[in-house]
Image (cartoon, rainbow, N blue to C red):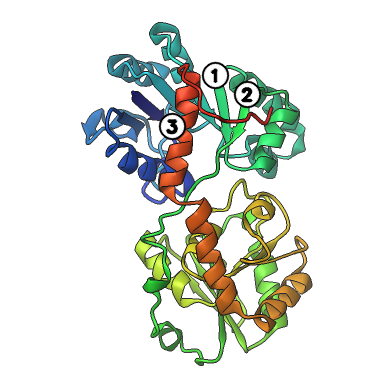
Amino acid sequence: MHIADITMFYAPASGGVRTYLDAKHRRLSTRPGIRHSLLIPGSHLSEQDGVYKVPAPALPFGKGYRFPLRLAPWRNVLQDLQPDLIEVGDPYLTAWAALDARRQLDVPVIGFYHSDLPLLVSNRMGNWVTNNVEAYVRKLYGNFDRVLAPSQVMANKLIGLGVRNVFVQPLGVDLHTFNPGARDPGLRAELGIDENTRLLIFAGRGSKEKNLPVLLDCMKRLGPRYHLLLVGSSMPAQVPDNVTVVDEFCPAAQVARLLASADALLHAGDQETFGLVILEAMASGIPVVAVAAGAFQEIVTDQCGLLCAPNNPLAMANAVRELFSQSSVILGEQARQHVERHYAWDTVVNSLLGHYHAVLGAPWPLTANG
C-alpha cells in the first residue's frame, strides 16, 4: 500500500499537523508492505527519504510557511508517485490538487479536518464571511471518500454542515520525548523561584484564540505562591510578577523538559480542535487545568486534571487551588497512564490503517459518526 499525504501546513515552527505527519511518516516507514510519501511546500522540487518538497512561495512574515498558488506542480508529483490513497491535510489548493489527481489515478482521497476553518476566518475577518466559508467547507469535504476529524466536537461541526462519512480520529503523543524522566530539578532555581512555589506552564503560540489574558488575570488572583511559565512565540510582553516568558519557538525536547519540570499545565483556549499540548503535558506526568470547551472535554478526564468555565479567570484560579488541594502527583501519574493507554502514536497509526483499508475496499470494524 502506497499512501501519500499532502499539506501546506508544514513549516519549521508549525504545530500539530507537522507533529502528526512526522510521527506517521516515521512509523509507516517501518511497516512491511507500506510506502509513505509526504508532499510539503519548499523553495524548489526535491525529495529526501520519501518527503517531497513542491515549489511554493514563502508567506511574508509567515515564519517559514509557504502558500501554494499553482495546482499543477502538486498534481504532477502525485501523478508521478501513483499512490494507492491520498490524504489531504489542509483545505486550500493542495486539497484541490489531490482531488484533481484522483480523476487521473482513480484512487480514494481522505480529508483530515485539522482546523475549524469557519471559526478561524471569522476570528480574523468577522462573522459576515461565515456562511460563505461554511459553504466552501461543505463543498470541499463533500468530495472526499472519507473525512477524519481529531475530536467529536469537530466531527459534529462537519456533520452539522452536511458533510457525510465523518470519522473521529484522535491524534497521538510522543511518549518517549514527553515523559516524566525529562524533569529538571534545577528549573526552579533557573527561574529564580522558591522550591515550594507551585510552577504552572503553558506552551504554544500566543495567538488570540489561546486567551492568554485569562491566564495572566488568573495568576494575579493566585498570587506569589504560584508561578506561570509561558513558552512559545508571540507571547505578551507585559505580564504579572509571578509570570516568566520564553518568547520563542522551542524544540520538542526543550518543551518536554519544561513540561515535566512543572506541576501542572494551564490552558485557557476555548476553540481547540484537539489540544496536543495537553496530551504532551499528561505524557510528561503532570495534571491539567483547562477550560470546559472545544475538544478538552474529550481528552481531560477527572483523573487527569480539572476543567473550569471558559473566559473566567476567577474560575480558573479556583480550579488551580482545588487541583493542589488534591494529590497533584497522583493525578500526574494517572494522566501519564491515560495517554499510554489511548494516545500512543502506534495506536493512532493502527487506527489510520483501518481507515485506509476501509476506503480501499478491505474494511476494518470501524463505526462512522455521520
Residue at horizontal 55 percent and vertical 78 percent from the top: 329
Using the image, tell me which numbered label, if any, was put on residue 165: 2
C-alpha distance separating marks 3 and 2: 16 Å
Q: Which SS class for mark 3? A: helix
Residue located farthest toward the front when viewing the structure as drawn: 365
Q: Is residue 124 above or below residue 192?
A: above
Quarter residue 190 falls in: bottom left
Quarter residue 45 falls in: top left
Q: Quadrant of the N terminus?
A: top left
Residue 154 rendering spot, x and y as whole percentages: 66, 39
Asked whether the viewer can see residue 251, the reply is no
Give 305 or 357, whichever is nearer the viewer: 357
Residue at horizontal 38 percent and vertical 73 percent from the top: 181
Residue at horizontal 37 percent and vertical 45 percent from the top: 23
Nearer mark to the viewer, of 3 and 2: 3
Q: Which residue is mark 1?
A: 145
Q: Is residue 23 above or below residue 239?
A: above
Residue 44 rendering spot, x and y as whole percentages: 26, 30
Using the image, tell me which numbered label, if any, was put on residue 353: 3
Query: With 324 as the anchor, is 193 left or right in this view?
Result: left
Query: With 27 as the anchor, is 222 left or right in this view?
Result: right
Quarter residue 48 falls in: top left
The kind of residue tagged 2 is Asn
Q: Residues within 10 Å of mark 1 (few under 14, many from 20)?
A: some
Q: Which SS class for mark 2? A: loop
Residue 220 rendering spot, x and y as whole percentages: 69, 80
Residue 69 rendering spot, x and y as whole percentages: 43, 24
